[in-house]
Structure formats: structure tokens, C-alpha cells
Image (cartoon, rainbow, N blue to C red):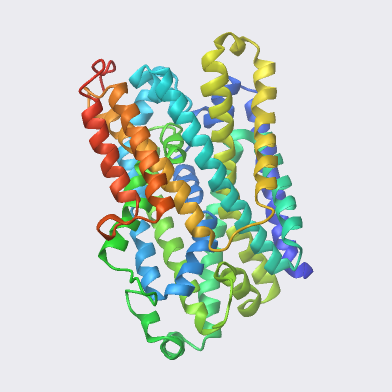
């Protein structure tokens, strides 16, 4: 093990735990649920930008995305830039509406808002089950990513790497709650930007400059330099449109975005967060995917493409600089994991346990114990599930992402912007969208060449409009 690489990572972990301790002290000053799950709605614009960007940029972006760019070439870099407006799009559409509703009804979770809007226990139960299933898969992806990262860079066993990571992220999330998550996300966002810039610079330098790298890529396969990739099925219009729906438009239905939209301090924080977050996403997406694509000129024969970023770190960076960069993908993965752990805990405790047993809220000591223990138990379960990982984890992550989007997208958008939307239409949309997505993905069916997310969302939209003809009129005025 190279201690020059390990020391910067250890320093980063110390900073993370310091933030968790600070958050723990803040937690004692107010209502436990409000503090633990939404940080007392106190995020500034910078923190909002960093936590939204850091949560979105996880193992798929830092490990799986560059792996796909390594495999497909510069076409995947172009495809990845579709994600640039994600912060502008999601916070711009959802931010103010969700904040108003959340403060009006003292909502702490996406399911709180959905229940207040639709007044349906059945809808809330379906939403909770879909969220728990999808988040479990997405957390598993993050754990696999960090296991491969540490296995390659520190030369330790994959299972040991996963266990060490689980111990770290589980404990600091357990201690600090949502405030610890967003504080460390701010640190992680800065580290990610510095790390990706250093890596891209090092890759270009090691390859002898951009012109030299392009010549080497053309020698390997000229199609690596085209927008359409090297596979028999090109990265054509239908693929790009599907990808845009999946990783940009569909994120309007992603609960981890919603929780940010109800936790910021004021309108000024929202506006600043949108601008800063868009800049951060642009830098991260371009740098990390371009590093993966150009890295093929330096390491042309990698068998497991998800290992391109950690392998490049070792190959092109001095040990101490590699250690600094190692904190970047670690930061990305930790920021995604901790957010999903908090939301999983809030779903089980706030949305299910307290919703159906409201008198239990009077016992705050018990609620604290259940909330924090749920975080630890979920960490343990995910750890056990990923000890034997699959390859190309980007597809597993996109599968779970699509499941959430087909469940929540139309329910959220119509709930916010259509006064006549009712619970019957919402439930029809959730069931139709989710199960059609599972079926189309499982069977490998591509209607008109589109990824399953496009027809599944279309079916969900039709189901909402048809189902909305029955049931009571929406009860909450927006």
C-alpha cells in the first residue's frame, strides 16, 4: 500500500467526520426530525449548489461514465454533456414550488408532499416501496464503484475496501444526519472539481498532448473519434434522446433532487444555487468523461472498463497528487450514498412508521434511535449485497434511476402544476410507468429504437390522463 496515496484520503475522511460532529451538535438545538432529515431548511446558495451537484455526480459519473467513454470514445463525452442543465432544470422547475408547499405543510420528505397533495395512503405506500427498491440498487452501485476504486488504487481486496467504506459512510451519516450530508457535500464538490481538472491535465500530458492522443485513438479505432461510437448500435438520435430523458428531463421525478428543493434557506439561495450548480456540473461532466475517453490512448487494453479512472490515477499522477484525486471519486460516491441513506431512513421512519403510528412521534428519544439505527442497518444490508459485483455498473445505476423516474415524474409535475390532478390518476401512472419500464428493460424491448425510459414515461403519462377521469378532483390548490 502506497502511503503517499493514502494520507490525503485519510485527511479528507478526518474533515468529513469533523463536519458530522458539528452537525451532531447542531441537531441538539431544534426539532430532531426537521434537523436530521432537512437540516432545519438552512442551506445557502453555495451549499445548495454543491450538495445538488455532488449528490447527482456519483459512482456512475466518476466510475461508470468514464468507463463508457473509454469503450465508446468521444461520442460518449458528447452524450454526457446532455447532463449540463440538470441543476438549472430541476431546481428551476421544482425549487420554489416545493419549498412553498413544504413550509406550508411542514413536509420533510417527498412522500409528505405527495400525501398532502393527493390525500392517499395507497399512493404514499406505493411511492415508498418504489423508492426503497430503487435506492437500494443505486446505493449498491455506489458501493461497487468505491470497492473497485480502492481495490485498484490501494491494492487491497475488493471486499475489504467495501467494508472500510461502509464503516466510514455509515458512521458519519448516522452521527450527523442531513446537515452532515450537505456540509460534507460542499467539501466534496470542491474536491471533485480540483481532482477532475488535475486528472485531465495529467492524462493529456502523459499522452503527449491532444494531437498525439487523437492519433493514437485513430490507430486503435477511427470510430472512437466519431459522435456515434464503436458499437454495432451507434450513439444515434434515438439513443441520445433516450439518454437525455433518463439523465436530465426525468430527474424532475428523482426524490434526491426534491429533498434539496425543500431544504434551502430562501429565494436568493435558490437562484445562486442554480447558477453555481450548473457551472460545477459542466466542469465535472466534461473533465471526467474526457479523461476516460482520452485515457484509452494511454491504456488501450483495459479489460474492465470501470477501472479506467483509478488505473489512470496510478499511471499518470505522482502518488501524493493521486491521493488528492482519490478523494474526488470517493467524495462523489460518499455524497450520493449519504443522501440516499438519509432518504431511506426518512421513508421508513417518517413516511411509514410515523404515518401509520402518529402517536409514536411524542417519544422523540425513540424516534432518534429508530432513525439512526435504520441508517446503520441499511448500510449493512447494502454492503452484504455487493460483495460479488457485476461489470459495467453504469447500466445497473441507469436501471434504478429509470425506475424512480417512471414512478414519480408525472405524479410530481401534475401534482405541482395541475389543480385537477387526483390520486387515481397518480396511482395509475406510478403502476403503469414502473412496471412497463421493468418489463421493457427486462425483455430488452426498444420501441422505435428508444430506450425503455421513453415509452415507459409515455405509458405513464397516458395512464395518468385516463385514470384522472375517475376519482375525486385534486384537493389541494397549487
Q: Position of residue 108 (x, y in %)?
A: 48, 25
Q: Position of residue 86 (x, y in %)?
A: 36, 50
User: Would residue 209 be visible to someone looking at this image?
Assistant: yes
Q: Which quadrant of the figure has residue 227?
A: bottom left
Residue reaching furthest to the front: 443
Q: Nearer the viewer, residue 78 or 381?
A: 381
Please indicate whether residue 388 sits to the left or right of residue 99 in the image. Answer: right
The N terminus appears in which quarter of the rendering? bottom right
Instruction: Residue at 69%, 68% (x, y): give it.
Output: 153
The C terminus appears in which quarter of the rendering? top left
Please indicate whether residue 47 sits to the left or right of residue 6 in the image. Answer: left
Instruction: Residue at 50%, 47% (x, y): give it.
Output: 55
Please indicate whether residue 320 sits to the left or right of residue 349 in the image. Answer: right
Vertical relation: 283 (above or below) 162: below
Vertical relation: 270 (above or below) 329: above
Vertical relation: 364 (above or below) 42: above
User: Would residue 42 be visible to someone looking at this image?
Assistant: no
Please indicate whether residue 451 sits to the left or right of residue 400 in the image. Answer: left
Q: Position of residue 376 (x, y in %)?
A: 69, 36
Instruction: Residue at 54%, 34% (x, y): give it.
Output: 343
Amino acid at each position: 500500500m502506497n502511503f503517499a496515496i493514502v494520507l490525503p484520503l485519510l485527511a479528507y475522511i478526518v474533515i468529513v467526520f469533523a463536519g458530522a460532529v458539528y452537525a451532531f451538535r447542531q441537531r441538539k438545538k431544534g426539532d430532531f426530525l426537521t434537523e436530521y432529515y432537512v437540516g432545519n431548511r438552512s442551506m445557502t446558495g453555495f451549499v445548495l449548489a454543491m450538495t445538488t451537484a455532488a449528490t447527482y455526480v456519483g459512482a456512475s459519473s466518476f466510475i461508470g461514465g468514464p468507463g463508457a467513454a473509454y469503450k465508446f470514445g468521444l461520442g460518449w463525452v458528447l452524450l454526457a454533456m446532455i447532463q449540463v442543465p440538470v441543476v438549472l432544470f430541476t431546481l428551476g422547475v421544482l425549487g420554489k414550488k416545493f419549498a412553498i408547499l413544504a413550509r406550508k405543510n411542514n413536509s420533510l420528505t417527498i412522500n409528505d408532499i405527495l400525501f398532502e397533495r393527493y390525500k392517499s395512503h395507497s399512493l404514499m405506500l406505493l411511492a415508498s416501496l418504489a423508492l426503497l427498491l430503487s435506492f437500494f440498487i443505486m446505493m449498491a452501485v455506489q458501493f461497487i464503484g468505491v470497492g473497485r476504486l480502492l481495490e485498484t488504487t490501494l491494492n487491497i481486496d475488493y471486499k475489504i475496501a467495501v467494508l472500510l467504506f461502509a464503516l466510514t459512510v455509515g458512521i458519519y451519516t448516522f452521527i450527523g444526519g442531513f446537515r452532515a450530508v450537505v456540509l460534507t457535500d460542499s467539501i466534496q464538490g470542491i474536491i471533485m472539481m480540483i481532482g477532475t481538472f488535475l486528472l485531465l491535465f495529467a492524462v493529456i500530458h502523459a499522452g503527449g498532448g491532444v494531437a498525439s492522443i487523437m492519433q493514437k485513438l485513430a490507430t486503435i479505432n477511427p470510430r472512437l473519434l466519431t459522435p456515434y461510437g464503436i458499437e454495432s448500435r451507434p450513439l444515434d438520435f434515438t439513443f441520445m434522446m433516450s439518454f437525455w430523458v433518463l439523465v436530465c428531463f426525468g430527474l424532475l421525478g428523482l426524490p434526491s433532487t426534491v429533498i434539496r428543493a425543500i431544504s434551502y434557506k430562501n429565494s436568493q439561495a435558490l437562484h445562486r444555487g442554480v447558477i453555481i450548480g450548473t457551472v460545477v456540473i459542466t466542469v465535472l461532466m466534461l473533465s471526467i468523461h474526457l479523461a476516460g475517453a482520452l485515457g484509452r490512448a494511454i491504456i488501450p487494453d483495459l479489460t474492465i472498463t470501470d477501472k479506467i479512472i483509478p488505473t489512470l490515477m496510478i499511471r499518470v499522477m505522482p502518488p501524493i497528487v493521486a491521493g488528492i484525486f482519490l478523494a474526488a471519486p470517493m467524495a462523489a460516491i460518499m455524497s450520493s450514498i449519504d443522501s440516499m441513506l438519509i432518504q431511506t431512513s426518512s421513508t421508513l421512519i417518517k413516511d411509514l412508521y410515523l404515518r401509520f403510528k402518529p402517536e409514536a412521534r411524542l417519544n422523540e428519544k425513540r424516534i432518534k434511535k429508530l432513525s439512526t439505527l435504520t441508517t446503520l442497518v441499511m448500510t449493512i444490508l447494502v454492503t452484504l449485497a455487493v460483495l460479488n459485483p457485476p461489470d459495467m455498473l453504469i447500466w445497473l445505476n441507469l436501471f434504478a434511476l429509470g425506475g424512480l423516474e417512471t414512478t414519480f415524474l408525472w405524479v410530481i409535475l401534475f401534482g405541482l402544476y395541475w389543480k385537477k390532478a387526483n390520486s387515481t390518476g397518480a396511482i395509475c401512472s406510478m403502476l403503469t410507468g414502473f412496471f412497463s419500464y421493468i418489463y421493457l428493460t427486462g425483455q430488452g424491448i426498444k420501441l422505435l429504437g428508444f430506450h425503455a425510459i421513453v415509452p415507459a414515461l409515455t405509458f405513464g403519462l397516458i395512464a395518468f390522463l385516463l385514470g384522472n377521469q375517475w376519482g375525486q378532483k385534486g384537493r389541494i390548490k397549487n
